[in-house]
Amino acid sequence: MVVRAFRPGDEAALHGVFYSAVHCLAAKDYAPKQVEAWAPSLPDVDRWTARMRQLRPFVAEESGRIVGYADLQNDGYIDHFFVSGDRARRGVGRLLMNQIHERAKGLELRALRSDVSLTAQPFFERFGFRVVESRVVVIRGVELTNARMVKNLSELSGSAG
């Protein structure tokens, strides 16, 4: 398995990962109506393409197939972090999280933060994130619960810079 930079043309495969993550994995923590609002069966392809090109995520590939992706913005925000439903618990998430930490080190970030689903919270906690706020967000008119999670990186390094 390898992690590489996003390339234009990855968008459809990334949507497949996103859709399967929400419909296969998050479905255990969210109602069908919530899952469909979050990852609709008929996506807005142009909007999705533009979003992925803006985020420019890291892409995890296994045998040439995209099996996960995640981004890290320059301010320490992780907007997307998804692993294909059929590849959960097989090291894809760990590989992506390690890539995020390497990039954070290069950017000299003091903290990471993300708005994390109920499903992903235990995974993020294993990497030292903690919940600072439980939230209810509205997506396509449907309420979903998630959590704002943060990880202080300066504690790990022992010194700034």
Image (cartoon, rainbow, N blue to C red):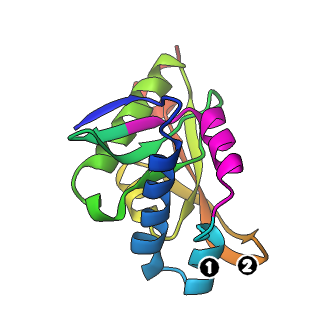
Residue 134: x percent and y percent? 64, 68
Identity, as a three-letter code, of the amino acid under mark 2: Val
Q: Choose top left, top right, bottom left or bottom right for residue 112.
A: top right
Report the residue at 40% width, 37% height from top: 59
Ranked by sequence position, the earlier of labels 2 and 1 is 1
Please give the residue where the numbered disc 1 appears in the rendered image.
34
Given contact means CB atoms under 8 Å apart, are the residues at marks 2 and 1 in contact? yes
Q: What secondary structure do most residues of the magenta stretch adopt?
A: helix
Would you say 9 lies left or right of 84 here? right
Q: Choose top left, top right, bottom left or bottom right for residue 40.
A: bottom right
Would you say 26 lies left or right of 38 here? left
Report the residue at 24% width, 49% height from top: 91
**Mark 1: which secondary structure?**
helix
Residue 4: x percent and y percent? 37, 28
Residue at the right extreme, as displayed: 141
Residue 149: x percent and y percent? 57, 54
Residue 120: x percent and y percent? 45, 62
Q: CA distance from mark 2 to mark 1?
A: 6 Å
Mark 2 crowdedness (10 Å alpha carbons): few <14, some 14-19, many ≥20: some
**Mark 2: which secondary structure?**
strand
Tell me the magenta residue range.
Answer: 43-59
- Residue 56 part of the magenta segment: yes
Please give the residue where the numbered disc 2 appears in the rendered image.
142
Report the residue at 46% width, 25% height from top: 103
